Amino acid sequence: MSKLLKAGAVLGGAALAVGGLRWAASSEPRYAPWEKPRFEDFEHRVLVLGGGFAGFNVAKHLCDLSRDREDVGVMVISRDNYLTFWPMVPGIVASDVGVRNIAQPLRRPLIHAGASFRRAEVESVDFEKQVVSAGGQEFPYDHLVLALGAQPSYFGIPGVQEHAINMKGIPDAVAIRNRVIERFEEATLRRGEVSESELTFVVIGAGATGVETAAQLHVLIHEVLGPEYPSINANRFRVYLLDALPHILPELDPGLRRVARGQLSARDIEVMTNALAEEVTESCVKLKDGRQIATENVIWTAGARPNEKLEKFGIPLVEKTNGAKVDEYFRVEGYDNVWAIGDNATVPDGDGGFVPPNAQAAVKEGKLLARNILAEIDGEGLKPFEFKSQGQLIDLGSHFAVNDVFGIKFSGALAAIFWRGTYLVRLESPQNRVRQALDWALEFFSRPTVAQIQNTVDE
């Protein structure tokens, strides 16, 4: 039976590969290279700042909706030339997910759709002249979309910024993996001279990213690296998960929280709730209640805030969140042609609260904003944003997940398969989709291979 399952997985992966390659090769770009108009020459120029889920989706759908018209031009300016598929980032830690598979190229799909793309750091915005300065150049616009994303928030805790690794993107996930490998190498070289603090990893923040990161650390230590270092007792490594709240995964159903916490505890991951970090030093984490955890490996996943560039731009912000103050159509207060979505916008949910700043909401915001910008250009009515969460999927590694999908709650191996299938389909690049499917198919035959490659995130 196991041989049949393996054969089926390989055949399924091969079929997906063939289908994906055919799809990638068959679609035609909107413009031939010599036909592409300059962005400056369009009558209605929509400039999108940021290439995350929100920025990419508004640009891509705006191009799709205006494919048959020649008056709307779209340009994206982003610091990176790839879109990070955030839900799968923690999987990089244990090499369950390949870096190149979730670093999805921005330029190709955007140019294919008919947009322009510039990789540059946004410097300033002149709202009167309707010009953005980025990378030493000026870019005019008629409609401006702010989708610059978020950045870490340290809540004023001393030492976090200096001594912790932020889990805020692909380079950080690779840095965490490299740190674990380095500790194994040091333990092999120095034998008993390695201190417990060097082999202790503390993840601060028990939301989805923190829980998944802690779980993937365990997989990397015990399932991937442990067998490759037979002289090292992997049980010397300790993983802690801390949160100031009374429970982990506050956004999840209480029953699924208990299942997730039980799984973490069964793997000897020390879960500490009501544990408020007061200071992080190079050798320990100090808690407000006086306890200390000796560690030289702290990972920060506890908080994020809207991009600080919003303050520099001088647009109205919501005091509670520091996000751009927008209406239900995503229009920034006080401006007719400036819009904000994603992590850097505080979008009202219609019930006195705000839409959660997650990837699921950002994708939907981008799609609706594309329609609203076209409606504004054409003098038509705008549609208010209404958000209803589809649920949440949490991968705990070791072929175990806890899922809440439209109110249906399930966990275990089936949930892990559902997690993989759902996010595999949502990868934007067909090539990335195929490569990741084949990587997972190969897991039936061997463990992932890992290596410590410094100063790069390539694999």
Image (cartoon, rainbow, N blue to C red):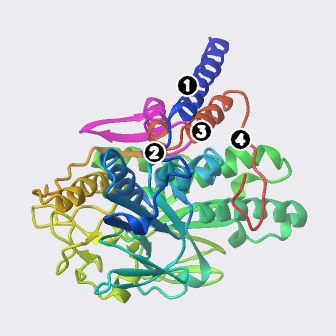
Residue 19 is tagged as 1
| Magenta range | 394-422
Task: Give the mark, 4 or 3, whose residue is nearer the N terminus.
Answer: 3
SS label for mark 1? helix
Q: Is residue 90 toward the left or the right of residue 407 in the image?
A: right
Which quadrant holds residue 306? bottom left
Crowdedness near tag 3: few (<14), some (14–19) or many (≥20) residues, C-alpha within 10 Å: some
Task: Give the mark, 3 or 2, whose residue is nearer the N terminus.
Answer: 2
Which residue is identified by label 3?
431
Q: Is residue 168 visible?
A: no
Which residue is identified by label 4?
448
SS label for mark 3? helix
Label 2, label 4: how far apart the Cα atoms are: 39 Å
Q: Is residue 448 above or below residue 125?
A: above
Task: Give the mark, 2 or 4, whose residue is nearer the N terminus.
Answer: 2
Q: Position of residue 125 (x, y in %)?
A: 38, 84
Q: Give the residue drawn at x 76%, y 72%.
A: 195
Mark in the foreground, 2 or 4: 2
